[in-house]
Amino acid sequence: MFDLVIIGGSAASTAAGIYAARRRLKLKMVCKEFGGEVATSGEILNYPGMTETEGFALTAKFKEHLKYNEVEPEEGVTVTGIVKKGEGNFEVFGRKIDTPVSYQAKAVIVATGVHPRHLGVPGEDVFYGKGVTYCTTCDGPLYKNKKVVTIGGGNSALESALMLAEIASHVTLLNKNDKFKGEQVLIDKVSHSPKIEVLYQAQTKSIAGEQFVKKVIYEDKKSQTEKSVATDGVFVHIGLIPNSDFIPAAVKKTPLGEIEINMKAQTSVPGFFAAGDVTNVPYKQIAIATGQGVTATLSAVEYLNKLTA
Ligand SMILES: Cc1cc2nc3c(=O)[nH]c(=O)nc-3n(C[C@H](O)[C@H](O)[C@H](O)COP(=O)(O)OP(=O)(O)OC[C@H]3O[C@@H](n4cnc5c(N)ncnc54)[C@H](O)[C@@H]3O)c2cc1C
């Protein structure tokens, strides 16, 4: 029986793990892949104490800090369910590749982040990895001097287009609405970039190609006609979905699937805590996720102390 199982291997879980180790909790930390969205964040200029860093470097620092506190996250573990059997008695189960795994714990912290929303149009799955991607930071550099399309209308689509403008020969930004929802500074940069062409009211209908992507077909909602844009790569940035499918029904979630927490990172189920992007915290940022990880562990310690009182 562990005192605490932490699910996740990124900003929130690293902070939670460091605090748990320093409180000498009997701890298990499991994750699909260490690094999470931090690893794919690209350039990071707003994490306090790090004037200028990037995702993989910060991920390595997180791992080093855990190791210093003798925490070894177990990677390759996908958690598929959590059952509360009684007060201070949870079972976390899942699989490591094909092998079923399960852990018993007195308390649980879920810090599983988010994943990109898919378009759900024909061709998207077929050309995934053959030109269709959800990570500009990871795959953008592969499109040097090529023609690319970014799809989306918020900050991450604007950031994607700006990053691609430094690499590709031409960027078409498809926005299904008639304006962007992102920050004005990014909108201004996009509108001043000679390499970025913005198509408003362009609803993606399908993605086509042969061995690799060749074009995106969209409906021009103004003229109600179907048009296409030739491309070598499609970068989809249309929002994020919380990784919370496996959360038990007793734990309250928002209609978007975010785990509802209070200021102490407590969920609706005692002993079950959550932190980071998977929660209903406004503003999904690394510094916020780490702060919540700290809060979750301190609250878990309080819960554990009450169990033994
Ligand atoms: C392109 C991009 C750029 C960004 N730039 C910045 C920036 O400059 N500054 C900033 O502050 N923020 C930035 N962010 C946001 C930042 O990355 C997130 O706020 C942060 O990563 C949230 O951390 P987290 O620990 O909550 O979750 P994540 O980083 O998403 O990590 C989730 C972890 O949970 C694991 N996991 C998921 N599901 C399961 C499961 N079922 N079982 C086991 N493990 C699971 C994953 O493998 C991963 O280890 C950016 C995000 C993106 C996408």
Image (cartoon, rainbow, N blue to C red):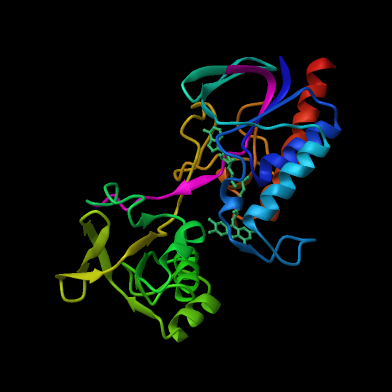
Q: Is residue 127 left or right of residue 144?
A: left
Residue toward you, 292 or 113 = 113
Magenta residues, start to end: 102-121
Q: Is most of the magenta stretch helix, strand or loop?
A: strand
Residue 291 in view, yes or no: no
Q: Is residue 272 left or right of residue 176?
A: right
> Which image quadrant: the C terminus?
top right
Residue 36 vs 42, above or below: the answer is above
Q: Is residue 138 left or right of residue 221?
A: right
Place of residue 275 in the rendered image (x, y in percent of width and height, measured from the top left): 65, 41
Q: Is residue 259 left or right of residue 118?
A: right
Residue 95 in view, yes or no: yes
Place of residue 161 in the rendered image (x, y in percent of width and height, measured from the top left): 44, 71
Q: How many marks?
A: 0
Residue pictured at 50% horizontal, 57% vertical? 138
> Which image quadrant: the N terminus?
top right
Residue pictured at 72% horizontal, 46% vertical? 62
Residue 104 forms part of the magenta stretch: yes
Place of residue 124 in the rendered image (x, y in percent of width and height, measured from the top left): 28, 51
Place of residue 18 in the rendered image (x, y in percent of width and height, measured from the top left): 79, 38
Residue pictured at 62% horizontal, 18% vertical? 103
